[in-house]
Structures are given as structure tokens and as C-alpha cells.
Image (cartoon, rainbow, N blue to C red):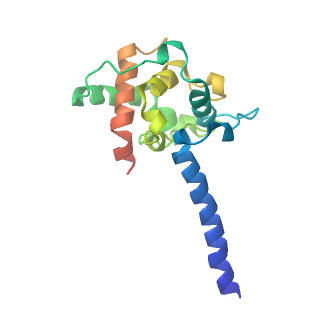
């Protein structure tokens, strides 16, 4: 009897994990009212929820990367990432940087997030990097006053183009 129990438990747990992953991956296409913003929710989920429900704030609605999609732009973004992001998000964007280890919620896994359709949108990325995470209960600083607009766009190009490959 014990032998049959293990596959059933594994299937039940695996099904739950698969279901949760499917909901996250298909989230931009699902009914957003199924994802209520609970008091105390923190991290990237509330930001995604807000964007899907309310759109992007002000100037970020039509934001588009003005920099050319070139190797030079991505290399510039890598330098900006190393100087401003890697300490919390880690070298591969996994959210495992030394400065982020004790943060609650922990830094986002940018390598994973960069593959989520909503995060690939320039408006979402520019809003996130420029405004930071204070509104959503995270320690991510707002970079709009400390990093040039071109450097913000360069790091966005780097995250979108390189982090998924680096993390593999």
C-alpha cells in the first residue's frame, strides 16, 4: 500500500505546483478579478496585479526603449546592472545577491520574470526600474533620480535580452 501512496502524493503535489505555475505564466491572459490584492501583499505580484487592473501610471503608459537594440546597448546595460542591480538580484538575476539575502520580500528573480509576457513590455520595465518598489512593499530603490534615463533603458535591454540566457 505504501508504494501506491507515494506516486499519488507526488501527483497531487506536482499537480498543485503545475497549476500554480500555469496560473502565473498565463496570468496576463486570465481573468484579473481572480487575483485580489490582499492587504499586506508585497513584491512583484502586487505590481503585476496593479498593472493588469489599472494600467501603467502616467508617463509610463507609452514608454518605449529609445535605444537601438545593439550589442553596445546590452553591454552598457550589463555595466549598469552590475553597478546598481547585481548586489540584490545577483549576477544571473536569480534574486540571490549578497545585499538582498535578508530582504523580505526577497529581490525578484529577474531571469524568470524576464520571460513573463507582461515584464517584456517596456512600460512595465521602465515603471519598475524608475519608481522602485516602495509602493508595493519592497526594498527596491527608485532609480529615476540616480540613474540616467539612457542607463535605465540600457539595463532594461540587458535584462530582456541577456538574463534568460545567463541563468540557463
Residue 84 visible in the picture: yes
Residue 35 visible in the picture: no
Which residue is rendered at x = 55% and y = 52% of the image?
22
Query: Which of these two is toward me, 25 or 76?
Result: 25
Residue occupying the far left of the picture: 71
From the viewer's perspective, tell me whether residue 120 is left or right of residue 34. left
Query: Which of these two is toward me, 27 or 132?
Result: 27
Residue occupying the far front of the picture: 31
Where is residue 5 shown, x and y percent of the image?
69, 80
Depicted 135 relative to depicted 102: above or below: above
Pick the quarter of the image with the N terminus: bottom right
Which residue is rendered at x = 30% and y = 25% of the image?
76
Which residue is rendered at x = 53% and y = 38% of the image?
98
Quarter residue 18 falls in: bottom right
Depicted 52 relative to depicted 16: above or below: above
Query: Which of these two is toward me, 143 or 79?
Result: 143
Where is residue 140 shown, x and y percent of the image?
57, 27
Q: Tally the numbered discs.
A: 0
Residue occupying the far right of the picture: 39
Quarter residue 12 falls in: bottom right
Where is residue 95 shown, x and y percent of the image?
52, 41
Where is residue 166 shown, x and y percent of the image?
35, 45
Depicted 51 relative to depicted 131: above or below: below
Amino acid at each position: 500500500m505504501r508504494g501506491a501512496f507515494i506516486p499519488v502524493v507526488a501527483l497531487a503535489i506536482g499537480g498543485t505546483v503545475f497549476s500554480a505555475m500555469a496560473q502565473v505564466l498565463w496570468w496576463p491572459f486570465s481573468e484579473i478579478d481572480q487575483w485580489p490584492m490582499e492587504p499586506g501583499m508585497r513584491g512583484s505580484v502586487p505590481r503585476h496585479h496593479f498593472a493588469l487592473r489599472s494600467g501603467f501610471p502616467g508617463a509610463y503608459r507609452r514608454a518605449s526603449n529609445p535605444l537601438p537594440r545593439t550589442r553596445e546597448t546590452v553591454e552598457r546595460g550589463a555595466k549598469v546592472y552590475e553597478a546598481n542591480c547585481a548586489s540584490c538580484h545577483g549576477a544571473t538575476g536569480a534574486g540571490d545577491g549578497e545585499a538582498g539575502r535578508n530582504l523580505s520580500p526577497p529581490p525578484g528573480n529577474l531571469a524568470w520574470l524576464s520571460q513573463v509576457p507582461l515584464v517584456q513590455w517596456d512600460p512595465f520595465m521602465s515603471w519598475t526600474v524608475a519608481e522602485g518598489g516602495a509602493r508595493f512593499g519592497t526594498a527596491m530603490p527608485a532609480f529615476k533620480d540616480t540613474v540616467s534615463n539612457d542607463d535605465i533603458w540600457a539595463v532594461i535591454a540587458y535584462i530582456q535580452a541577456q538574463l534568460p540566457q545567463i541563468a540557463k
